[in-house]
Image (cartoon, rainbow, N blue to C red):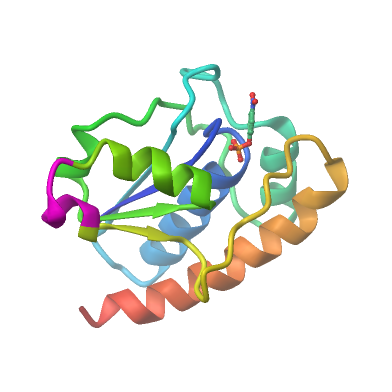
Amino acid sequence: MHILMVCLGNICRSPLAEGIVRHLADAENLDWTIASAGTGDWHVGQPADKRSIAIAKTYGYDISKQRAQHFNSKMLEDFDLILVMDKSNLRNVLNLAKDAEQRKKVRLFLTDDLEVTDPYFDDLLFDPVFKIIENRAKQLIEELKSE
Ligand code: 4NP
């Protein structure tokens, strides 16, 4: 299973989703490839936002070695599942999909049509955003490991 997490900058939300899902999948000996990317290219090559690195560390995850990359259309071929944080990401990713098979791979990370709020402009959002992502990550592992 190759899973790509996508947000806007690839420094706050999707690096958390990448690091948490990878950690949980590894703990279950699942041979998955987890990556993340941003629909914007401003932070390419940079580590995650220091607030994301810090909140992950607080809860026992190390995301400090991950580096931001820019989402591109080849990722729609290379990954089985592309999980996006909000509806703007969804539109941007779907715009690059070339057929129904690729569109089918793209979903919101959360269930029930919910979005992961962008915490970039509010330090206080990093803790709740972490918890929302971690909860959903645990659910995802259960959902996907039987596939
Ligand atoms: P992310 O948050 O999409 O969760 O990584 C953002 C990070 C950076 C910017 C916007 C959102 N930015 O405008 O640079």
Residue occupying image coordinates x 58% and y 33%:
11
The residue closer to the viewer here, 114 or 16, is 114
Q: Quadrant of residue 131?
A: bottom right
Q: Quadrant of residue 47?
A: top right
| Quarter of the figure with the N terminus | bottom left
Residue 93 makes an appearance in the image: yes
Percent coordinates x, y for residue 62 in the rendering: 58, 45
Residue occupying image coordinates x 30% and y 38%:
95
Residue 59 makes an appearance in the image: no
Percent coordinates x, y for residue 133 in the rendering: 59, 62
The vertical placement of 58 against 141, above or below, is above
Q: Would you say residue 10 sits in the magenta stretch?
A: no
Q: Which residues are the magenta region?
A: 98-103
The vertical placement of 13 against 136, above or below, is above
The vertical placement of 88 against 107, above or below, is above
Q: Would you say residue 99 sits in the magenta stretch?
A: yes
Q: Image quadrant of ligand 1?
A: top right
- Number of marks drawn: 0
Percent coordinates x, y for residue 99 in the rendering: 12, 48
Position of residue 126 in the picture relative to residue 100 (left or right):
right
Percent coordinates x, y for residue 94 in the rendering: 31, 45
